[in-house]
Image (spheres, rainbow, N blue to C red):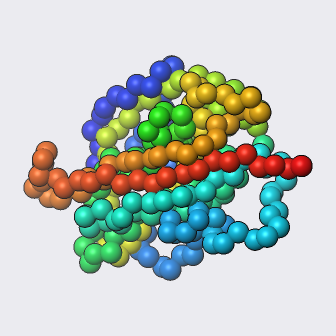
Amino acid sequence: MHTRRSLLQSGGLLGLAGVTGLAGCTATANDDDPLPDGGDDGSGDGNGGSEPSDREYPPGSTHEATITGVDDAPDLPVAPRVSLANPYVTEGQPVVLRVDVDNPTDEPVRIGEYRPVVFQYVYDTDGTLVWYPHSERSTDGEPDRAVPDLDLADDGCWRLASGIAQTMEYGTVEIPANGTLTAYVGLYATADAPEPADGCFPTGAFRFDTNYTVFADGMDGDDNPSATWGFDLAIETIDND
């Protein structure tokens, strides 16, 4: 991974350790790894297909997330896709997104910035929600690397108590030929997000976008092809009555 230092401020005083690592992320050659149970490839309803007539939710579930739309693949030698590894907000964990970035070419591809390409530290367009590395679903064997120690508003409430300032290394990551970069990120409400009357987590429709830049030897500045890609997410309250 190639890095150069930059600083991103979003309020607060918390810094990030281990900036040279990408938490919960690995780039591997494709081995037909199936999506986690309950996930989808970003082309369906976000929860693995048609809904059953009688829904059964995990104990303690308060909210459910659904991927409602994804952009077409960018005109780049990489193809991102998203699925919900855990679509539910529970006391034990937030909504968890699986991000895969495929390299369908016969040559390695280097992309950046290496965190946002897997939606780490990416906010929705209104600044209400943000994705953070999810250590419990790491795929690189080092779940604690570069994972922030988040200050939550309350136990079981996936809302930040304060803003965050993070020092970042601008880095790139190489995806092997015919390989895939995979990461898991958890969804949190920002400290400034409107707080609903019936709980602490926002509901509604949300849009997430990120930028993909391809780096090749001899390419600098505007010579690096880039594109924006994203998806839409809906959050609904679960009626447990």
Q: Position of residue 201 (x, y in %)?
A: 68, 36
Please state the horizontal and vertical placement of residue 53, each as a whole percent of the image: 79, 70
Where, by quadrant of the figure, is residue 169 drawn? top left
> Quick one: 75 or 4, which is closer to the camera?
75
| Residue pictured at 81% horizontal, 49% vertical | 239
Q: Residue at (64%, 52%) from the top-left corner?
A: 65
Residue 66, quarter of the rendered image:
bottom right
* Residue 138 seen from this side: no
Work out whether residue 240 or residue 102 is closer to the camera in this orientation and state it: 240
Residue at point 55% right, 38% down? 129
In this figure, what is the number of numbered marks? 0
Q: Is residue 54 positioned above or below 228 on the image?
A: below
Residue 40 seen in render:
yes
Q: Is residue 179 above or below residue 238?
A: below
Residue 207, image x, y percentages = 47, 46
Q: Is residue 114 left or right of residue 51?
A: left
Left or right placement of residue 8 versus residue 195 in this view: left
Specify whether 180 is left or right of 144.
left
Q: Residue at x 85, y 50 (%)?
A: 240
Give the answer, above or below, for where 40 lies relative to 240. Answer: below
Front residue of 221 and 158: 158
- Between 213 and 42, which is closer to the camera in this rendering? 42
Residue 231 in the image: state x and y as whole percent: 45, 54
Left or right: 30 in relation to 196: left
